[in-house]
Image (cartoon, coloured by chain):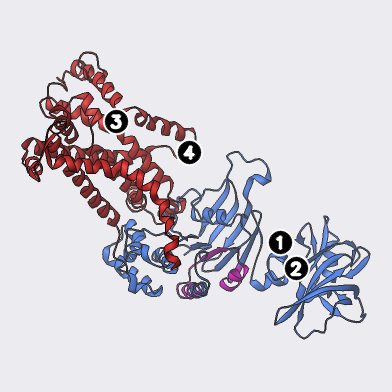
Amino acid sequence: MAQIEMDGVAHSYLRHPEKDADYAIKTIANIWDDGGAYALLGPSGCGKTTLLNIISGLLTPTRGRVLYNGTDVTALPPEKRNIAQVFQFPVLYDTMTVYENLAFPLRNRGLEKDAIHRRVQEIADILDLTPFLKQKAYGLAADAKQKISLGRGLVRSDVAAILFDEPLTVIDPHLKWHLRRKLKEIHEQLKLTLIYVTHDQMEALTFAEKVVVMYEGEIVQTGTPEDLFENPEHKFVGYFIGSPGMNFLSCRLEGNIAYVNGLGIKLGKQTANAAQKTAGKLEIGIRPKYLEISPRPVENALPAHVKSFEDLGSYKIAAILLDEKTLYARLPEDAPLAAGNVWIVFPPEKTKLYADGRLVK
Amino acid sequence: MNKWENNRAWLLTVPVLVIVAFSSIIPLMTVVNYSVQDIFGPGQSLFVGTEMYKNVLRDARLHEALWRQFLFSGLVLLIEIPLGIALALAMPKKGWGVSFSLVVMALPLLIPWNTIGSIWIIFVRPDIGLFGAFVNNVLGIGFDHTARPLDAWITTLLMEIWHWTPLVALLAYAGLRAIPEVYYQAAKIDGASPWATFRYIQLPKMRGVLTIAVLLRFMDSFLIYAEPFVLTGGGPGNSTTFLSIYLVKLALGQFDLGTAGAFSLIYFLIIEILCFVFYQVLKNVGKGTGT
């Protein structure tokens, strides 16, 4: 077990990278605490797998260092790093039995037969694989295969961390839930550092204690699921987390009033103060859940127009036209709502300000 | 009722039936017809039942040719399959080297078979052949494939290996390239040695193409004719008279069509049975009984 530190890590697949765009991973400095359950969340192609492969040593970064418990392991190959990785598709040794598959990493490391036997039995027990131990691995169902891949990581008692690269892609939906629970159980039981790559926000939010959001080769925010929802530090986090995503409107600032095409929206004091020091393209952002809608004019409200709404059973999503921009609002099921003119309020404490995509705070 | 009216669709299979009839059924039946007769000349023949089969099965020279053939095919498989795999493992995986090595590997496969025999006759000649002259004059070892049976065997085997190992290598290379990168990554994470990676990933994943390679090389080497016929003509003595060479001697040399017909059918059966056995064995190698 170990704390894993990324010190100024950058990676390009090109031999001679020049521009920023040549880098799959732009400079990342990050610490993965010992025993943490992390989700690495981001859209396809944002560099999640690259980052994972750098942690495990399958890739050597172009720049920067990787440290395990303070020891520089950047130059070490995966087999010397004591790391385990579970891939998107189950990787099995077809000709071996389940038992031999689980024992393989230990045999390669020259452990004694008795020690291997004990450890394999123990892990098979945790993963409910005991009845299959004598079977060949290739004939099993996808979820059992993925459990074997996971087992090959768990079986090494000294493993620094287990990395998962979208491990549930090929698993049936009803088994996904089961396997995710199993992973949580294992995490609580063994206190291992787990890093779980996914592009599915539900998966990330249910699995992890901390979610690391990546976007275009950068980590844009690390936080608890609640943090990500309440305080998205980057426009992308606002978009990506929550359904529908955050509303954004371009604006210009005068004092603590943000003007969207002449319509003034009052901001929180702290935000307004911080904004005085920032330059760049300004936008306000607000979660659909926090937009307040009123059928009558109220204080600080802006006139708008309800275009349409969808009833999703437990709540409603309204599409609201504010000066030619469409905003989405998430309203309680019993909210009285009809198409037509309404007044909307941006509560100052929930209205965020972004400069060049980054939260002003 | 209507069922019967639509049966004209069967007519669509007629072209296939005609082609198969002319390409295999009729020739095969002609051979069957020959094998039960004693043929003296055109139009002169006598029905003899199974006598030709009895003759063939008792023919000592045929027995010798059969064992010779097994020895030859066995050696060919033992050498060409591991050598082909080794070559495939050594071939480059990216860059210009890939196409270069593919073309070089394919060269022997493009040469007509009797030309290969001629090339090797010259290659091993003790006076002017690159190989023959080198072994005789530089190494000082007497080597003459026309005089000594062992030398004839070595030459025939070398020729066969040079000609066909590239096929095995190309098949194995295709099998290797089809293994997803993630298997190698998992092997690295699991700390597998290069040997373990070969034994537990590459070899099992190549099983399909290697099955085809073994079957092809077995059949071809068991049927080998043109190259040794040109190179040694079956000699010296009968030392390189393989089954097909003996068969042609019987059928065309001695015009013993009845015996040759019976011989052909037995030959055909041996290949069929062995291929079936090989296929069954290779299909099940490394597979468990998983429920």
Taking depth in this image into account, of A26 and A89 the one nearest to the observer is: A89
Q: Nearer the viewer, mark 3 or mark 4?
A: 3
Q: Amino acid at mark 1?
A: Phe
Q: Colour of chain A?
A: blue
Asked whether the viewer can see residue B22, the reply is: yes
Q: Position of residue B152 (x, y in %)?
A: 16, 26
Query: In the picture shown, does residue A155 fall above or below B166?
Result: below
Q: CA distance from mark 3 to mark 1?
A: 61 Å
Which numbered circle lies on residue A236?
1
Say whether marks 4 and 1 touch (CB < 8 Å): no
Chain letter, disc 4 residue:
B
Q: Which mark is residue A326?
A: none
Residue lying at 35% horizontally and 48% vertically, measured from the top left: B17
User: The residue under label 4 is which amino acid type?
Assistant: Lys
Which image quarter holds the C terminus of chain B?
Answer: bottom left
Secondary element at image label 1: helix
Whether tag 3 and tag 4 are in contact, CB under 8 A, the answer is no
The residue singled out by tag 2 in the image is A246
Where's residue A159, x and y in %?
43, 63
Tell me whether marks 3 and 2 sit on the same chain.
Answer: no
Q: Which residues are magenta?
A: A182-210
The tag on residue B94 is 4
Q: CA distance from mark 4 to mark 1?
A: 38 Å
Discs 2 and 1 lie in a common subunit? yes
Quadrant in which the N terminus of chain B is drawn: bottom left
Q: The residue under label 3 is which amino acid type? A: Trp
Q: Chain of mark 2?
A: A
Hey, which quadrant is residue A111 in on the image?
bottom left
Report the Cα–Cα distance between label 3 and label 4.
25 Å
Of labels 2 and 1, earlier in sequence is 1
